[in-house]
Image (cartoon, helix red, strand yellow):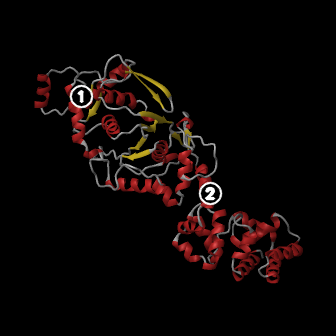
Amino acid sequence: MTVSKTRFAPSPTGLIHIGNARTALFSALAGQSFLLRIEDTDAERSRREFVDELLGDLRWLGLAWQEGPDNSEPDSAWYQSQRNAIYQQYYDQLVTHGNAYPCFCSATELEVSRKVQLSAGKPPRYSGRCANLSGDETRQRVDEGRQPTLRFRVPKGEFVTFEDGVRGAQKFLSDDIGDFIIRRADGSAAFFFCNAIDDALMGVTDVVRGEDHLANTPRQIMLLQALGLPVPRYAHTALILGDDGAPLSKRNGSRSINQLREEGYFPVALLNMMARLGHHYECEELMPLGELKSRFSMQHLGRSPARFDPTHLNHWQSLAIRSVTDAALQHWLRPETTAIVPEAQRSIFLDVVRSNCLFPDEADQWARILFTDEPLPVEEASSLAADQAGESFFLAAIDAANAAGADFDGFLSTLKAATGAKGKGLFMPLRAAFTGRHDGPELGLLYRVIESQRLHRRLAEFTYASN
């Protein structure tokens, strides 16, 4: 039985974002074997540092590849920039069999032709101007120093059909495509060509990629058929939109995986969010990567655009924080945060973090509120609640705390009896004094965690402020 093999083939021209990472995830989920290939034929924009970041991001997400590079050192096995000799064999084969020809048209000539076709209401495609040059005409242009591109000769009057794994039956007329460039004038391989050749040579059986590549697929099928190479199955996933309905970009919420990692997101939160961007799972619980894979189905990929919602990501982050081990959560905290928290209070502080924090910054804020004498940044709602409670309320709270000691229930009962306060009139002023916030951990937990002298000082400060 043939093992299904998928691949992720990024260009290292920048940091990978949610869209790229989702493609990598779907590819890893869809195949029994997962391959990573670096498509670095764009010499001007490709950078080794981006390869390093890419490998680090994929490893951090847990997307292990069974075949692919171990580091950013280019080699001919996985880096397209090192595979020109391989590509040249197939260029020669295409030329020999009349399936490719040199094109000497300049960029200006091509642009003029494109505008003429558009003005005539026709779709722009190559006119075939160089398709039938004689050997003498070709040599003359070369002798003049003109550097040709190499174009694939598209068969006339044929239909290219395939079954897309997401979008179903697809049919393209070859006459609508036009002869396309497979080698640039500088000798580098064009995407259409090397991407298809490497998929075939590397045994990729299933290509999962965005729908923006759908129009590339008939070109690549014709190339592979002309060369007698195996054609993989294709599945084109719906694009991701931002919360404004436009394609996801930096402007409407997209961030790099590196940035999300720096902000403190857990890998499992990102995986669960991305796995549901355009794919349906019956299970709405947080799932590890292995379970996401076992429950993944190409039939559950939707054709409509998926919408990225930051609150959706934060939902999974919240579930991740509640599910990770204490050791993992402790490691997630900043070193300076850990240094603030007394050793005896670390376990209970982790409980505070699990129920109240999404990011390390928030955990650090709570550590400073609970365990330091730094001034509290009192929120407006809390300040208003404290003002409404008045001086007598906080004086009674100090007396109740002195009488009850560590007994929160006793403290609350005494304070209620002394002031007649209840509901928000009781809890909001206390929250204001304890933390300066209008939300957060349960009051009883705050009462037990905050050191008693510090708690009394805060009550006293609000008593003076109410005068």
In 3D space, how far apart are the residues under numbered discs 2 and 1 (Cα atoms)? 55 Å
Q: Nearer the viewer, residue 177 or 465?
A: 177
Give the mark nearer the N terminus: 2 vs 1.
1
Q: Is residue 218 above or below residue 185?
A: above
Q: What type is the residue that disc 2 sits on?
A: Ser
Q: Please tell me how crowded label 1 is: few (under 14), some (14-19), or many (20+) other residues with Cα within 10 Å.
A: some
Could you tell me residue 362's position as x and y percent?
A: 60, 65
Q: Mark 1 points at which residue?
A: 94
Task: Find the residue positioned furthest to the front.
Answer: 1
Quarter containing the C terminus: bottom right
Asked whether, in this view, residue 89 is left or right of residue 192, the answer is left
Q: Residue at x 69, y 80 (%)?
A: 451
Query: Taking the image as drawn, is residue 115 in sight?
Result: yes
Q: Which residue is drawn at 86% across and 76% down?
A: 414
Could you tell me residue 434's position as x and y percent?
A: 71, 73
Q: Which of 140 and 409 is in front in this view?
A: 409
Q: What type is the residue that disc 1 sits on?
A: Leu
Q: Please, what secondary structure does the residue beneath circle 1 have?
A: helix
Q: Residue at x 69, y 66 (%)?
A: 437
Q: Which of marks 2 and 1 is in front?
A: 1
Q: Which residue is drawn at 50% across and 46% down?
A: 251
Asked whether, in this view, residue 397 is left or right of residue 368, the answer is right
Query: Taking the image as drawn, is residue 105 in sight?
Result: no
